[in-house]
């Protein structure tokens, strides 16, 4: 039965992917080009970063893999949180689940179907990006292709699968507790636990602290740093992967393979525990979800600030559109919960970045490397926010969109209002990330605040462009039958949009790398030279961003005029 359903789900996916509609053909060709460009760019970026850190900056293998471990930790937490939120819609609010529950299929089989559906649906792009990053990483060490394939299948896939399995267990625990103490209290508790855990990790595994003592232990850097790693890190999956890669790079497979074995074993045990809990509790948790959903909805009996009965300073058309957007956003629990999680992660990232101490670091070009890493990661978070909350805005109007399109409201005003709301949200987060992550670099640039103003300028254009592209492509690839905003932000069209924004961010990094390196150079001290240095890159960045924004605006406006 399970194989039968999986077979026809695969056939359905293939049929929908190779649809002959013009929009599907354009999406397929564009996806092929963008995926290819993204894959090649990720490969080059990973290869150059690895070469620069090891051959030019001389960070040492262990310190480099400490950075890798941190990236893997962020990836693990992101996959875990994403799967918890997405799995709630997939396992408890899906129409397919309601259909399957009426058939002679075991509850465990239904759970496996939706669990795998959710895992493969949300992890394909991540797997592609990770594989190309590993190709670039492995090219520095001259790893053969088959070895990299083995790493992906037997190390990285279990790493992702472990995160997803933990998400399934946590979600069922949330539903169990929600039936007793309330959904909002459980979410608040989980939220605090995750924030505390992330804070402790970055507090105890701060690589900057290791870098500060780097020169004192040259040339025996690896031996020193390996003694400085806190003991609890050795029990985290991201550290197992990093240790495997470290020993593989040294050619010591006798020490590398046990870490892969531990990862695979723990993944199998956790997935088995997930299936056991699902066998005992999944159907009961589904019944609990039916009781939890009504209690999470907004009460309309009392007047609130966004009530249509309240007075507004806006015109009637703007007022009704604005309040509609806000109320429909708050009505969907997964929307504001996911927003809180992503904003909290951005806050943790910003606070951690603002407390970095760079004064004692003496590695060549380390300041510039850290700044570019923080800049890129901040841009990645901004793009993720835009994709998650702006891309689905038009498609979520659903089949009732005809009532809005036939109302006496200009369609351009609908698009403008959606853009302004998304842009203000993303801009506030982007500027906060930029300013807080630029603070540690003021002393490194001789007290100049030019880097902060340059970052504020860049954050404005990145926010403007990513929001415009996400809204424009979100209208072009809108699926008005999809009511789940998380799945709408995980479609092929959303993936294509995200990859375009990532390529845009890489172009920005290439544009700013020269002025940033010069600002960190002691040779640029006078104010006129610094301002003249950033004028041309800033103008180029504004031009590229403006062109892409106009392109997104045109696509979005045309998408509102087509039938649906």
Image (spheres, grey):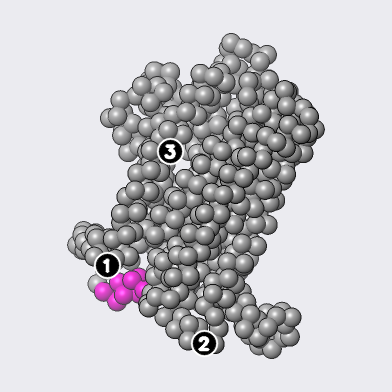
Pick whichever, 252 or 520, lies toward us: 520
Distance, label 1 to label 3, CA atoms, is 31 Å
Q: Main secondary structure of the magenta part?
A: helix
Q: Is residue 71 visible?
A: yes
Q: Is residue 35 above or below residue 471?
A: above
Check if mark 2's residue and mark 3's residue have beta carbons within 8 Å. Answer: no
Q: Earlier in the sequence, mark 2 or mark 3?
A: 3
Q: Is residue 101 visible?
A: no
Q: Is residue 527 above or below residue 384?
A: above
Quadrant (top left/top right/bottom left/bottom right) for the N terminus: bottom left
Q: Is residue 450 left or right of residue 394?
A: right
| Residue at horizontal 51 percent and vertical 21 percent from the top | 54
Q: Which mark is residue 251?
A: none
> Start and end of the magenta stretch?
94-103
Callout 3: SS: helix
Q: Earlier in the sequence, mark 1 or mark 2?
A: 1
Quadrant (top left/top right/bottom left/bottom right) for the C terminus: bottom left
What residue does disc 3 label? 42
Callout 1: SS: loop
Number of the front mark, 2 or 3: 2
| Residue at horizontal 54 percent and vertical 80 percent from the top | 410
Pick whichever, 415 or 15, lies toward us: 415
Q: Is residue 127 above or below residue 408?
A: above
Q: Is residue 159 above or below residue 424?
A: above
Q: Which mark is residue 407?
A: 2
Pick whichever, 445 or 397, lies toward us: 445
| Residue at horizontal 44 percent and vertical 55 percent from the top | 497
Q: Is residue 421 magenta?
A: no
What residue does disc 1 label? 21
Q: Quadrant of residue 159?
A: top left
């Amino acid at each position: 039965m399970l194989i039968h359903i999986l077979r026809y789900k695969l056939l359905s996916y293939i049929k929908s992917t190779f649809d002959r509609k013009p929009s599907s053909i354009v999406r397929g060709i564009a996806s092929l080009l963008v995926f290819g460009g993204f894959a090649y760019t990720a490969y080059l970026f990973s290869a150059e970063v690895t070469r620069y850190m090891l051959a030019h900056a001389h960070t040492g293998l262990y310190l480099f893999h400490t950075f890798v471990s941190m990236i893997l930790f962020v990836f693990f937490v992101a996959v875990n949180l994403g799967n918890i939120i997405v799995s709630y819609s997939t396992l408890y609010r899906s129409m397919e689940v309601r259909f399957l529950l009426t058939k002679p299929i075991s509850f465990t089989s239904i759970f496996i179907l939706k669990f795998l559906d959710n895992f493969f649906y949300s992890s394909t792009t991540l797997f592609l990006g990770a594989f190309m990053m590993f190709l670039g990483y492995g090219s520095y060490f001259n790893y053969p292709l088959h070895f990299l394939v083995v790493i992906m299948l037997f190390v990285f896939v279990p790493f992702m699968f472990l995160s997803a399995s933990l998400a399934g267990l946590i979600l069922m625990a949330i539903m169990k507790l929600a039936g007793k103490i309330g959904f909002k209290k459980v979410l608040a508790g989980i939220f605090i636990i995750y924030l505390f855990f992330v804070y402790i990790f970055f507090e105890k595994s701060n690589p900057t602290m290791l870098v500060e003592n780097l020169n004192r232990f040259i040339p025996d850097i690896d031996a020193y740093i390996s003694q400085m790693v806190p003991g609890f890190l050795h029990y985290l999956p991201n550290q197992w992967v990093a240790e495997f890669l470290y020993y593989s790079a040294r050619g010591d497979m006798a020490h590398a393979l046990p870490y892969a074995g531990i990862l695979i074993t723990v993944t199998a045990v956790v997935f088995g525990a997930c299936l056991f809990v699902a066998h005992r509790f999944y159907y009961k948790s589904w019944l609990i979800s039916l009781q939890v959903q009504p209690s999470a909805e907004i009460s309309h009996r009392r007047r609130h600030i966004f009530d249509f009965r309240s007075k507004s300073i806006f015109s009637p058309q703007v007022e009704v559109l604005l309040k509609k957007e806000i109320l429909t956003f708050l009505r969907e629990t997964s929307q504001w919960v996911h927003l809180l999680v992503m904003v909290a992660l951005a806050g943790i990232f910003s606070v951690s970045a603002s407390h970095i101490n760079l004064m004692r670091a003496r590695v060549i070009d380390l300041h510039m490397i850290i700044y570019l890493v923080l800049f890129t990661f901040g841009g990645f978070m901004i793009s993720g926010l835009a994709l998650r909350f702006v891309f689905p805005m038009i498609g979520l109007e659903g089949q009732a969109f005809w009532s809005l399109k036939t109302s006496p409201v200009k369609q351009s005003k609908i698009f403008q209002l959606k853009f302004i709301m998304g842009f203000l949200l993303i801009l506030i987060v982007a500027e906060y990330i930029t300013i807080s992550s630029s603070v540690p670099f003021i002393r490194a640039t001789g007290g100049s605040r030019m880097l902060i103003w340059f970052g504020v300028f860049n954050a404005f254009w990145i926010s403007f462009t990513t929001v415009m592209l996400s809204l424009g492509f979100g209208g072009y690839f809108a699926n008005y039958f999809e009511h789940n905003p998380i799945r709408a932000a995980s479609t092929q069209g959303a993936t294509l949009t995200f990859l375009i924004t990532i390529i845009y961010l890489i172009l920005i990094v290439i544009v700013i790398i020269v002025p940033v390196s010069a600002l960190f150079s002691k040779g640029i001290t006078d104010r006129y030279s610094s301002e003249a240095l950033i004028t041309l890159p800033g103008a180029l960045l504004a031009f590229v961003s403006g062109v892409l924004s106009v392109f997104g605006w045109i696509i979005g406006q045309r998408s509102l005029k087509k039938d649906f």
